[in-house]
Every structure is written in C-alpha cells, then in structure tokens.
C-alpha cells in the first residue's frame, strides 16, 4: 500500500458568501484570533504525516504565498527587539512543509481545481483538505482518513451528520455501516433538492483519493451550479463500491460563511493562552445584556 504523503488544498474559490471582505482578501487568510485559517489546515496535514502540499490559488491570492514565505525585514526587526519567541514562530511557518502553488486559471468548481493537481500528484494517493474548512481535534482528521485509506485501500471521505436545512447546501451520502465509525459509501449527490437526500451524512472538507480520480474528473461534466463537482467524480468511485466514509472525530468550522467564521473565532479565543481568561469575562458580561 502506497503511503499518503501529498495533499492538495483547493483555495481558489471566490468566497461570494463572505463578501465584501473577500473582494480583496482570500477567505483562507481570514484570522481565527491570530492565525489565518489556512495555517491551521496546513498544520493539520503536517501532523498527519503529509510532506508535500499543493495549494490551488488564483488571482488575488498572493497573500497566501507571502504567509508561508520567509519575511527577512520582520524577522530582523523581531531579533533586534529581543522577541525570540515571535521570531521562532514566524520562521517556523515557512518550514512547515514543502508548499507548492498552482493557479486555477478559471473558477470552474472544486472538481476542476482538484483536476489541476494531476501532475503534482502523479500516480499516488493524496489527501484533499478544503481551504475553507478548519477542523479542530486532538487526532488530526486528515490522519483519521489516511488510516482508513491504509486499512481498506479505497478512497475515503470525511463525513458528519448535518441538519435537514443544511443538507441541501452540501452533499448527501448513501452509507452502509461497516465497523466503528467506518461506512461503505455506495452513492452520493451534491446539493440535493428536498426529497433527493440519501441521508443527512455529508462530506465535510476532507478526503483521501486514489490517482484514478483524475481520469474520472476529466470525464465529469459540470453539475450543480454549473461547476465541475468533486462529488460527481467521487460518485463514480462510490458506484464501483470503492469508497469508504469516516464519521470523523473533530469540530469543523466553515470559514466560507459568516457564522462559521465567528464561531471559530469565539471558541478559539476562549481557549487562547494569552487572551482566553479576559475574553471569557468579557463574554459573560456581554451575555447578561443580551
Ligand atoms: P466552496 O464552494 O465552498 O467555495 O468550495 P467558494 O466557491 O469560494 O464559495 P462561495 O463563492 O462563497 O459560494 C470549496 C473549496 O473549493 C475551493 C474553495 O476555495 C474552497 O476551499 N474552490 C472552489 C476552488 O479551489 N476552485 C473553485 O473553482 C471552486
């Protein structure tokens, strides 16, 4: 079984649900207290044993590249000011992994973005971490999925149950229990109309895919919203009985919508070593006035 050593982070979406901030700022760079969302995602991949990461970007996402680069002026400034800890933190960001960038020249959908990664991935299995889904937990979700890939040798999607109101905005999966939190996935649909759902289980932000997905993506026509959907390509694997779903352990925040951004910030701030206590006191006081 080939080890999963590569990951692709699609981050070329337009982020229309969080306008106007995304007019000039990639949503993947939105801060969760003091760290941009994408850094948490890269750290999760690295914690799961990933060595090479391809971030799919597009026009206006240069900030992403700057964040993972060295910053000589800032570094010198911190060193001169005796701020060794801040210096180490800043330098370490640039050493997290081998990070590569590729532009998706047209915003044709998540499936199209993943298709752009073909020459980077080659003939290996690879992880996909959606650039706007931050998932917190002791055991990195990317690693949970890689373990399932190594156990079954099949494509894997990370899933969670969502509300009946939310399922129409996501995907819906047909699942059969296997063991523990593992399911066999035999069908799936992207953005089901009411009544078309298989279940309330939806793919949330992570998968591990075999390289065969690229040929399938090449044959996949535009689907929901006129975009080339990754779900439609993964459906082909599901119909071949080649897809596993893992009901992962972790808390997921959708940085692609306004409420998700606030939830991630508030919950992270409450646990933050520097400001956690003060923020808790502030929140309690504020809550009394609501
Ligand atoms: P989303 O559909 O959530 O992102 O895609 P979006 O298109 O930015 O959302 P709107 O405009 O608010 O509706 C899921 C992931 O796929 C990436 C996004 O950046 C996000 O991480 N994506 C989406 C691409 O890389 N390319 C695309 O063409 C579309």
Image: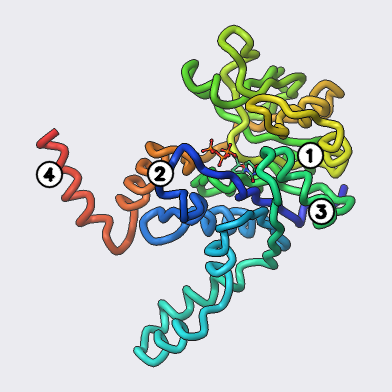
Q: Can residue 50 be seen in the rendering of this structure?
A: no
Q: CA distance from mark 2 to mark 3?
A: 31 Å
Q: CA distance from mark 1 to mark 4?
A: 49 Å
Q: CA distance from mark 2 to mark 1?
A: 34 Å
Residue 151 location, x and y as percent? 79, 39
Q: Where on the picture, by quarter, is residue 101?
A: bottom right
Residue under label 2, please give it. 261
Q: Quadrant of the C terminus?
A: top left
Residue 127 location, x and y as percent? 72, 47
Mark closer to the chain start, 1 or 3: 3
Residue under label 4, please give it. 285
Residue 119 location, x and y as percent? 84, 55
In the image: residue 139, left or right of residue 106: left
Q: Secondary structure at mark 3?
A: helix
Mark closer to the chain start, 4 or 3: 3
Label 3, residues with CA under 10 Å away: few <14, some 14-19, many ≥20: many
Mark 1, mark 4: which one is toward the viewer?
Answer: 4
Residue 152 location, x and y as percent? 81, 35
Q: Secondary structure at mark 4?
A: helix
Mark closer to the chain start, 1 or 4: 1
Q: CA distance from mark 1 to mark 3?
A: 21 Å
Q: CA distance from mark 4 to mark 3?
A: 51 Å
In the image: residue 162, left or right of residue 125: left
Mark 2, mark 4: which one is toward the viewer?
Answer: 2
Q: Secondary structure at mark 2?
A: helix
Check whether the beta carbons of the residues at disc 4 and disc 3 lie within 8 A of each other: no
In the image: residue 134, left or right of residue 96: left
Q: Quadrant of ligand 1?
A: top right
Which dot marks residue 121? 3
- Furthest-top residue in view? 195
User: Which residue occupies the foreground of this view, 224 or 247?
Assistant: 224
């Amino acid at each position: 079984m080939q080890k999963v050593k590569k990951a692709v982070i699609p981050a070329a979406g337009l982020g229309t649900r969080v306008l106007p901030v995304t007019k000039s700022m990639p949503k993947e760079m939105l801060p969760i207290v003091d760290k941009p969302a994408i850094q948490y995602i890269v750290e999760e991949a690295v914690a799961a044993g990933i060595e090479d990461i391809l971030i799919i970007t597009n026009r206006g996402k240069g900030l992403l590249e700057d964040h993972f680069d060295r910053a000589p002026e800032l570094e010198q400034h911190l060193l001169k000011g005796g701020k060794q800890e801040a210096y180490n933190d800043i330098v370490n960001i640039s050493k997290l992994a081998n990070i590569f960038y590729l532009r998706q020249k047209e915003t044709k959908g998540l499936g199209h973005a993943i298709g752009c990664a073909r020459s980077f991935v080659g003939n290996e299995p690879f992880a996909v971490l959606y650039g706007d889904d931050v998932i917190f937990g002791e055991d990195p979700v990317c690693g949970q999925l890689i373990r399932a890939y190594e156990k079954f040798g099949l494509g894997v999607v990370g899933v969670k149950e969502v509300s009946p109101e939310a399922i129409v905005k996501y995907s819906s999966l047909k699942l059969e229990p296997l063991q523990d939190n593992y399911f066999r996935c035999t069908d799936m649909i992207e953005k089901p109309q009411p009544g078309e759902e298989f279940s309330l289980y939806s793919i949330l932000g992570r998968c591990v895919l075999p390289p065969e997905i690229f040929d399938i993506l090449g044959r996949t026509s535009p689907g929901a919203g006129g975009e080339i959907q990754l779900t439609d390509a993964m459906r082909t694997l599901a119909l071949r009985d080649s897809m596993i779903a893992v009901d992962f352990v972790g808390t997921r925040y959708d940085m692609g919508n306004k409420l998700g951004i606030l939830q991630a910030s508030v919950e992270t701030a409450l646990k933050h070593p520097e400001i956690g206590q003060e923020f808790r006191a502030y929140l309690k006081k504020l809550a009394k006035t609501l």
